[in-house]
Amino acid sequence: MNMDQKIPSTVDRVQLIALIIGILGLAAGVLGIFTGNMQRFFQSYLFAYLFWLGLSLGSLAFLMLHFLTGSRWGLTIRRICEASASNLWLMAILFIPLLFDLSGLYVWARPSAVQASSILQFKSFYLNIPFFLVRAVIYFAIWIALAVIINRQSAVWAKNEDVSARERLKGWGAGGLILYVLTATFAAIDWMMSLDPLWNSTIYGLTIIAGQILSSLAFAVLVLNLVPGLGLGREWTLKTTPTPFKDLGALMMTFVMGWAYLAYFQLLIIWAGNIPHEVTWYVNRVHGGWLTVGIVVAIVQFVLPFCLLLTLRIRHNLRLLAWLGALIAVAYLINLYWQVIPNFYPSQFSFHWLDLALPVGLGGLWVGAFMFALKRRPALNETDQASLAQ
Protein backbone atom coordinates (compact mmCIF):
# COMPACT_ATOMS: atom_id res chain seq x y z
CA MET A 1 0.00 0.00 0.00
CA ASN A 2 1.40 3.37 -0.99
CA MET A 3 0.93 5.85 1.80
CA ASP A 4 1.84 9.52 1.59
CA GLN A 5 3.16 10.39 5.02
CA LYS A 6 3.99 14.03 4.39
CA ILE A 7 2.13 16.54 6.51
CA PRO A 8 0.41 19.07 4.20
CA SER A 9 1.38 22.73 4.23
CA THR A 10 -2.15 23.65 5.35
CA VAL A 11 -1.08 22.56 8.83
CA ASP A 12 0.98 25.76 9.05
CA ARG A 13 -2.17 27.82 8.55
CA VAL A 14 -4.05 25.76 11.12
CA GLN A 15 -1.18 26.23 13.56
CA LEU A 16 -1.24 30.00 13.12
CA ILE A 17 -5.03 30.20 13.48
CA ALA A 18 -4.90 28.03 16.62
CA LEU A 19 -2.26 30.24 18.22
CA ILE A 20 -4.25 33.39 17.44
CA ILE A 21 -7.40 31.83 18.92
CA GLY A 22 -5.42 30.74 21.97
CA ILE A 23 -4.01 34.21 22.58
CA LEU A 24 -7.42 35.81 22.16
CA GLY A 25 -9.04 33.28 24.49
CA LEU A 26 -6.46 33.82 27.20
CA ALA A 27 -6.67 37.59 26.71
CA ALA A 28 -10.41 37.33 27.32
CA GLY A 29 -9.65 35.33 30.46
CA VAL A 30 -7.27 37.99 31.72
CA LEU A 31 -9.96 40.58 30.98
CA GLY A 32 -12.24 38.54 33.22
CA ILE A 33 -9.79 39.00 36.07
CA PHE A 34 -9.84 42.77 35.71
CA THR A 35 -13.64 42.82 35.57
CA GLY A 36 -13.93 41.28 39.02
CA ASN A 37 -14.01 37.60 38.11
CA MET A 38 -10.62 36.55 39.47
CA GLN A 39 -12.01 33.70 41.54
CA ARG A 40 -13.99 32.27 38.64
CA PHE A 41 -10.98 32.67 36.35
CA PHE A 42 -8.90 30.21 38.38
CA GLN A 43 -11.82 27.80 38.78
CA SER A 44 -12.44 27.72 35.03
CA TYR A 45 -8.72 27.64 34.29
CA LEU A 46 -8.32 24.53 36.44
CA PHE A 47 -10.85 22.32 34.65
CA ALA A 48 -9.76 23.62 31.22
CA TYR A 49 -6.14 22.91 32.09
CA LEU A 50 -6.94 19.38 33.27
CA PHE A 51 -8.63 18.60 29.96
CA TRP A 52 -5.69 19.54 27.76
CA LEU A 53 -3.21 17.97 30.17
CA GLY A 54 -5.26 14.77 29.95
CA LEU A 55 -4.87 14.66 26.16
CA SER A 56 -1.09 14.76 26.49
CA LEU A 57 -0.93 12.20 29.29
CA GLY A 58 -3.37 9.82 27.61
CA SER A 59 -1.33 10.02 24.41
CA LEU A 60 1.84 9.25 26.35
CA ALA A 61 0.12 6.19 27.83
CA PHE A 62 -0.89 5.00 24.36
CA LEU A 63 2.68 5.37 23.12
CA MET A 64 4.07 3.29 25.97
CA LEU A 65 1.36 0.65 25.53
CA HIS A 66 2.08 0.48 21.79
CA PHE A 67 5.81 -0.01 22.19
CA LEU A 68 5.38 -2.49 25.04
CA THR A 69 2.98 -4.72 23.09
CA GLY A 70 4.35 -4.12 19.60
CA SER A 71 0.79 -3.48 18.42
CA ARG A 72 -0.03 -2.74 14.81
CA TRP A 73 -2.95 -0.48 15.77
CA GLY A 74 -0.49 1.79 17.53
CA LEU A 75 1.18 2.53 14.19
CA THR A 76 -1.98 4.26 12.98
CA ILE A 77 -1.85 7.01 15.61
CA ARG A 78 1.76 6.91 16.76
CA ARG A 79 2.85 10.19 15.19
CA ILE A 80 -0.24 11.92 16.61
CA CYS A 81 0.39 10.55 20.10
CA GLU A 82 4.07 11.53 19.92
CA ALA A 83 3.14 15.10 19.04
CA SER A 84 0.49 15.23 21.80
CA ALA A 85 2.92 13.90 24.40
CA SER A 86 5.46 16.51 23.28
CA ASN A 87 3.12 19.19 24.68
CA LEU A 88 3.83 18.18 28.28
CA TRP A 89 6.52 20.86 28.53
CA LEU A 90 3.85 23.42 27.58
CA MET A 91 1.47 22.05 30.20
CA ALA A 92 4.19 22.39 32.84
CA ILE A 93 4.43 26.10 32.00
CA LEU A 94 0.65 26.54 31.93
CA PHE A 95 0.42 24.98 35.39
CA ILE A 96 2.20 27.99 36.91
CA PRO A 97 -0.83 30.39 36.89
CA LEU A 98 -2.70 28.00 39.21
CA LEU A 99 -0.06 28.59 41.88
CA PHE A 100 -1.19 32.19 42.28
CA ASP A 101 -4.50 31.18 43.84
CA LEU A 102 -3.97 27.88 45.64
CA SER A 103 -5.69 29.19 48.76
CA GLY A 104 -8.70 30.19 46.68
CA LEU A 105 -8.97 26.80 44.99
CA TYR A 106 -8.11 24.47 47.87
CA VAL A 107 -9.57 24.60 51.36
CA TRP A 108 -6.55 22.82 52.83
CA ALA A 109 -4.33 25.72 51.68
CA ARG A 110 -6.15 28.13 54.05
CA PRO A 111 -4.61 28.17 57.56
CA SER A 112 -7.86 29.27 59.16
CA ALA A 113 -9.75 26.32 57.64
CA VAL A 114 -7.08 23.86 58.76
CA GLN A 115 -7.17 25.16 62.32
CA ALA A 116 -10.95 24.74 62.42
CA SER A 117 -10.96 21.11 61.22
CA SER A 118 -9.35 18.16 62.98
CA ILE A 119 -9.54 16.15 59.75
CA LEU A 120 -7.63 18.79 57.78
CA GLN A 121 -5.06 18.95 60.57
CA PHE A 122 -4.59 15.19 60.32
CA LYS A 123 -4.17 15.41 56.54
CA SER A 124 -1.89 18.44 56.67
CA PHE A 125 1.24 16.26 56.60
CA TYR A 126 0.32 15.56 52.96
CA LEU A 127 -1.96 18.45 52.02
CA ASN A 128 0.29 21.45 52.45
CA ILE A 129 1.58 23.92 49.90
CA PRO A 130 5.34 23.12 50.00
CA PHE A 131 4.79 19.38 49.61
CA PHE A 132 2.10 20.04 46.97
CA LEU A 133 4.65 21.99 44.89
CA VAL A 134 7.34 19.33 45.33
CA ARG A 135 4.97 16.62 44.14
CA ALA A 136 3.93 18.70 41.12
CA VAL A 137 7.58 19.15 40.11
CA ILE A 138 8.13 15.39 40.42
CA TYR A 139 5.06 14.61 38.29
CA PHE A 140 6.09 16.92 35.47
CA ALA A 141 9.72 15.83 35.61
CA ILE A 142 8.69 12.20 35.16
CA TRP A 143 6.13 12.91 32.44
CA ILE A 144 8.40 15.19 30.40
CA ALA A 145 11.35 12.81 30.75
CA LEU A 146 9.25 9.88 29.54
CA ALA A 147 7.92 11.87 26.59
CA VAL A 148 11.39 13.09 25.55
CA ILE A 149 13.05 9.69 25.88
CA ILE A 150 10.31 7.77 24.08
CA ASN A 151 10.03 10.32 21.26
CA ARG A 152 13.80 10.32 20.73
CA GLN A 153 14.06 6.54 20.68
CA SER A 154 11.04 6.36 18.39
CA ALA A 155 12.75 8.75 15.98
CA VAL A 156 15.88 6.59 16.00
CA TRP A 157 13.80 3.52 15.19
CA ALA A 158 11.85 5.35 12.47
CA LYS A 159 14.96 6.68 10.72
CA ASN A 160 17.47 3.83 11.14
CA GLU A 161 15.35 0.80 12.08
CA ASP A 162 17.73 0.34 15.00
CA VAL A 163 16.63 -2.88 16.71
CA SER A 164 18.28 -1.83 19.98
CA ALA A 165 16.15 1.33 20.00
CA ARG A 166 13.05 -0.83 19.59
CA GLU A 167 14.08 -2.96 22.57
CA ARG A 168 14.74 0.13 24.68
CA LEU A 169 11.29 1.44 23.76
CA LYS A 170 9.76 -1.80 24.99
CA GLY A 171 11.54 -1.42 28.31
CA TRP A 172 10.55 2.21 28.67
CA GLY A 173 6.98 1.26 27.83
CA ALA A 174 6.84 -1.26 30.67
CA GLY A 175 8.41 0.94 33.32
CA GLY A 176 6.79 4.10 32.00
CA LEU A 177 3.25 2.74 32.29
CA ILE A 178 3.84 1.97 35.96
CA LEU A 179 5.15 5.48 36.54
CA TYR A 180 2.27 6.99 34.58
CA VAL A 181 -0.41 5.19 36.60
CA LEU A 182 1.22 6.14 39.91
CA THR A 183 1.90 9.79 39.07
CA ALA A 184 -1.42 10.37 37.29
CA THR A 185 -3.27 8.86 40.26
CA PHE A 186 -1.53 11.08 42.81
CA ALA A 187 -1.89 14.12 40.53
CA ALA A 188 -5.65 13.45 40.33
CA ILE A 189 -5.77 13.28 44.12
CA ASP A 190 -3.74 16.47 44.52
CA TRP A 191 -5.36 18.63 41.86
CA MET A 192 -8.94 17.34 41.76
CA MET A 193 -9.99 15.14 44.67
CA SER A 194 -8.42 17.47 47.24
CA LEU A 195 -10.79 20.23 46.09
CA ASP A 196 -13.05 18.49 48.62
CA PRO A 197 -10.47 17.28 51.15
CA LEU A 198 -13.07 15.52 53.29
CA TRP A 199 -14.03 13.20 50.41
CA ASN A 200 -12.28 9.94 49.58
CA SER A 201 -12.42 7.45 46.71
CA THR A 202 -9.96 4.61 46.20
CA ILE A 203 -10.56 4.41 42.43
CA TYR A 204 -10.83 8.11 41.65
CA GLY A 205 -7.39 8.18 40.04
CA LEU A 206 -8.28 5.25 37.77
CA THR A 207 -11.44 7.00 36.57
CA ILE A 208 -9.35 10.03 35.62
CA ILE A 209 -6.78 7.84 33.86
CA ALA A 210 -9.53 6.05 31.91
CA GLY A 211 -10.95 9.42 30.86
CA GLN A 212 -7.53 10.65 29.75
CA ILE A 213 -6.90 7.59 27.61
CA LEU A 214 -10.39 7.64 26.09
CA SER A 215 -10.25 11.35 25.23
CA SER A 216 -6.74 11.08 23.76
CA LEU A 217 -7.82 8.16 21.54
CA ALA A 218 -10.88 10.13 20.41
CA PHE A 219 -8.67 13.12 19.59
CA ALA A 220 -6.16 10.94 17.69
CA VAL A 221 -8.88 9.40 15.51
CA LEU A 222 -10.22 12.88 14.78
CA VAL A 223 -6.78 14.17 13.70
CA LEU A 224 -6.18 11.02 11.67
CA ASN A 225 -9.15 11.98 9.52
CA LEU A 226 -8.54 15.73 9.39
CA VAL A 227 -4.84 15.69 8.46
CA PRO A 228 -4.02 13.96 5.15
CA GLY A 229 -0.69 12.19 5.02
CA LEU A 230 -0.95 10.37 8.34
CA GLY A 231 -1.71 7.04 6.74
CA LEU A 232 -5.45 7.36 6.19
CA GLY A 233 -6.12 6.38 2.59
CA ARG A 234 -9.04 8.42 1.28
CA GLU A 235 -9.94 5.62 -1.14
CA TRP A 236 -10.42 2.98 1.53
CA THR A 237 -13.83 1.46 1.99
CA LEU A 238 -15.26 -0.60 4.83
CA LYS A 239 -13.97 -3.79 3.18
CA THR A 240 -10.53 -2.54 2.12
CA THR A 241 -9.55 -0.64 5.29
CA PRO A 242 -6.56 -2.44 6.87
CA THR A 243 -7.23 -4.22 10.14
CA PRO A 244 -5.05 -1.94 12.34
CA PHE A 245 -7.30 1.01 11.47
CA LYS A 246 -10.41 -1.03 12.19
CA ASP A 247 -8.96 -1.87 15.61
CA LEU A 248 -9.29 1.77 16.65
CA GLY A 249 -13.05 1.40 16.88
CA ALA A 250 -12.69 -1.68 19.09
CA LEU A 251 -10.24 0.18 21.30
CA MET A 252 -12.63 3.09 21.64
CA MET A 253 -15.39 0.68 22.62
CA THR A 254 -13.09 -0.89 25.23
CA PHE A 255 -12.18 2.38 26.91
CA VAL A 256 -15.75 3.69 26.78
CA MET A 257 -16.83 0.60 28.72
CA GLY A 258 -13.82 0.79 31.06
CA TRP A 259 -14.48 4.40 31.99
CA ALA A 260 -18.19 3.73 32.52
CA TYR A 261 -17.45 0.67 34.68
CA LEU A 262 -15.15 2.63 37.01
CA ALA A 263 -17.41 5.69 37.22
CA TYR A 264 -20.55 3.66 37.84
CA PHE A 265 -19.14 1.40 40.52
CA GLN A 266 -17.58 4.35 42.32
CA LEU A 267 -21.06 5.89 42.45
CA LEU A 268 -22.72 2.60 43.41
CA ILE A 269 -20.35 1.77 46.26
CA ILE A 270 -20.31 5.28 47.75
CA TRP A 271 -24.08 5.76 47.42
CA ALA A 272 -24.84 2.32 48.91
CA GLY A 273 -22.42 2.93 51.78
CA ASN A 274 -24.24 6.18 52.60
CA ILE A 275 -21.32 7.56 54.59
CA PRO A 276 -22.05 11.30 54.97
CA HIS A 277 -18.63 12.74 54.15
CA GLU A 278 -18.37 10.47 51.07
CA VAL A 279 -21.89 10.66 49.64
CA THR A 280 -21.93 14.47 49.97
CA TRP A 281 -19.67 14.70 46.92
CA TYR A 282 -22.45 13.19 44.80
CA VAL A 283 -25.24 15.02 46.61
CA ASN A 284 -23.64 18.32 45.59
CA ARG A 285 -23.77 17.11 41.97
CA VAL A 286 -27.37 15.96 41.77
CA HIS A 287 -29.12 19.10 43.00
CA GLY A 288 -29.54 22.61 41.69
CA GLY A 289 -29.25 21.65 38.03
CA TRP A 290 -26.02 19.66 38.30
CA LEU A 291 -27.89 16.37 37.82
CA THR A 292 -28.72 17.40 34.25
CA VAL A 293 -25.03 17.92 33.51
CA GLY A 294 -24.19 14.51 34.97
CA ILE A 295 -26.88 12.84 32.84
CA VAL A 296 -25.55 14.55 29.72
CA VAL A 297 -22.07 13.22 30.50
CA ALA A 298 -23.39 9.69 31.05
CA ILE A 299 -25.32 9.71 27.78
CA VAL A 300 -22.71 11.37 25.56
CA GLN A 301 -19.61 9.70 27.01
CA PHE A 302 -21.08 6.22 27.47
CA VAL A 303 -24.64 5.41 26.37
CA LEU A 304 -24.49 6.95 22.88
CA PRO A 305 -20.93 5.78 22.00
CA PHE A 306 -21.65 2.30 23.38
CA CYS A 307 -24.80 1.87 21.29
CA LEU A 308 -23.18 3.22 18.12
CA LEU A 309 -19.96 1.22 18.49
CA LEU A 310 -21.91 -2.02 18.71
CA THR A 311 -22.32 -1.88 14.91
CA LEU A 312 -19.44 -2.76 12.60
CA ARG A 313 -20.55 -0.09 10.14
CA ILE A 314 -19.64 2.63 12.63
CA ARG A 315 -16.83 0.86 14.48
CA HIS A 316 -14.93 0.25 11.22
CA ASN A 317 -15.78 3.55 9.52
CA LEU A 318 -13.01 5.99 10.37
CA ARG A 319 -14.95 9.04 9.30
CA LEU A 320 -17.94 8.24 11.48
CA LEU A 321 -15.52 7.26 14.23
CA ALA A 322 -13.92 10.70 13.97
CA TRP A 323 -17.26 12.45 14.53
CA LEU A 324 -17.92 10.18 17.47
CA GLY A 325 -14.42 10.91 18.79
CA ALA A 326 -15.09 14.64 18.69
CA LEU A 327 -18.31 14.07 20.65
CA ILE A 328 -16.49 11.98 23.27
CA ALA A 329 -13.77 14.63 23.68
CA VAL A 330 -16.39 17.33 24.27
CA ALA A 331 -18.18 15.04 26.74
CA TYR A 332 -14.96 14.55 28.67
CA LEU A 333 -14.50 18.32 28.92
CA ILE A 334 -18.04 18.61 30.31
CA ASN A 335 -17.25 15.74 32.67
CA LEU A 336 -14.28 17.64 34.11
CA TYR A 337 -16.46 20.73 34.42
CA TRP A 338 -18.99 18.62 36.37
CA GLN A 339 -16.28 17.28 38.66
CA VAL A 340 -14.47 20.56 39.37
CA ILE A 341 -16.97 23.45 39.41
CA PRO A 342 -19.56 21.98 41.87
CA ASN A 343 -16.85 22.02 44.54
CA PHE A 344 -17.22 25.81 44.50
CA TYR A 345 -20.97 25.95 43.84
CA PRO A 346 -22.46 22.87 45.56
CA SER A 347 -26.07 22.07 44.71
CA GLN A 348 -26.28 25.28 42.67
CA PHE A 349 -25.62 25.12 38.93
CA SER A 350 -23.20 27.79 37.80
CA PHE A 351 -21.99 28.66 34.31
CA HIS A 352 -19.76 31.59 33.35
CA TRP A 353 -18.45 32.78 30.01
CA LEU A 354 -14.94 32.04 31.27
CA ASP A 355 -15.93 28.35 31.23
CA LEU A 356 -15.85 28.66 27.44
CA ALA A 357 -13.11 31.23 26.92
CA LEU A 358 -10.41 29.44 28.90
CA PRO A 359 -10.79 25.94 27.37
CA VAL A 360 -10.64 27.62 23.95
CA GLY A 361 -7.66 29.78 24.96
CA LEU A 362 -5.62 26.93 26.40
CA GLY A 363 -6.73 24.71 23.53
CA GLY A 364 -5.47 27.18 20.95
CA LEU A 365 -2.00 27.17 22.47
CA TRP A 366 -2.08 23.38 22.85
CA VAL A 367 -3.18 22.76 19.25
CA GLY A 368 -0.61 25.24 17.93
CA ALA A 369 2.21 23.47 19.78
CA PHE A 370 0.78 20.09 18.72
CA MET A 371 0.84 21.04 15.03
CA PHE A 372 4.40 22.31 15.41
CA ALA A 373 5.49 18.97 16.87
CA LEU A 374 3.44 16.89 14.41
CA LYS A 375 5.23 18.40 11.41
CA ARG A 376 8.56 17.35 12.88
CA ARG A 377 7.75 13.76 13.72
CA PRO A 378 9.48 11.32 11.32
CA ALA A 379 7.34 9.22 9.00
CA LEU A 380 6.96 5.50 9.61
CA ASN A 381 9.83 3.43 8.26
CA GLU A 382 9.36 0.69 5.68
CA THR A 383 9.05 -2.05 8.29
CA ASP A 384 6.24 -0.27 10.10
CA GLN A 385 4.47 0.69 6.88
CA ALA A 386 4.52 -2.93 5.74
CA SER A 387 3.12 -4.04 9.10
CA LEU A 388 0.43 -1.38 8.96
CA ALA A 389 -0.68 -2.39 5.46
CA GLN A 390 -1.28 -6.02 6.36
Image: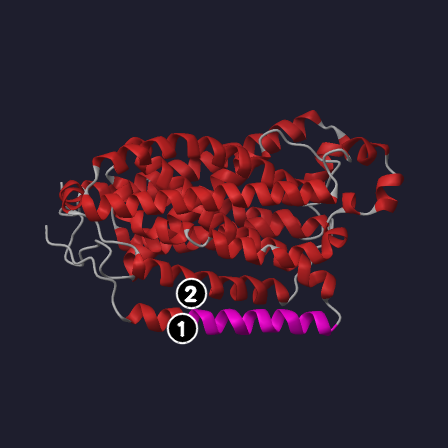
Residue type, mark 1 in image? Leu
Question: Magenta segment range?
Answer: 16-35
Compared with 358, 146 (above or below) is above
**Residue on which the image places disc 1:** 16
Task: Left or right? Give the position of 345 relative to 267.
Answer: right
Compared with 4, 291 (above or below) is above
> For this rendering, which residue is in front, 302 or 378?
378
Helix, strand or loop for the magenta stretch, by majority? helix
Q: CA distance from mark 1 to mark 2?
A: 7 Å
x, y percentage for residue 280?
73, 38
x, y percentage for residue 180?
48, 36
What count of labels does the image hold?
Answer: 2
> For this rendering, which residue is in front, 260 or 214?
214
Dot 1 or dot 2: first in sequence order is 1
**Residue on which the image places disc 2:** 368
Asked if residue 229 shows in the view, the reply is yes
Task: Left or right? Give the position of 368 relative to 249.
Answer: right
Identified at 62% across, 56% down, the residue is 96
Disc 2 is placed on an element classified as helix
Q: Are marks 1 and 2 in contact (CB under 8 Å)?
A: yes
Disc 1 is placed on an element classified as helix
Residue type, mark 2 in image? Gly
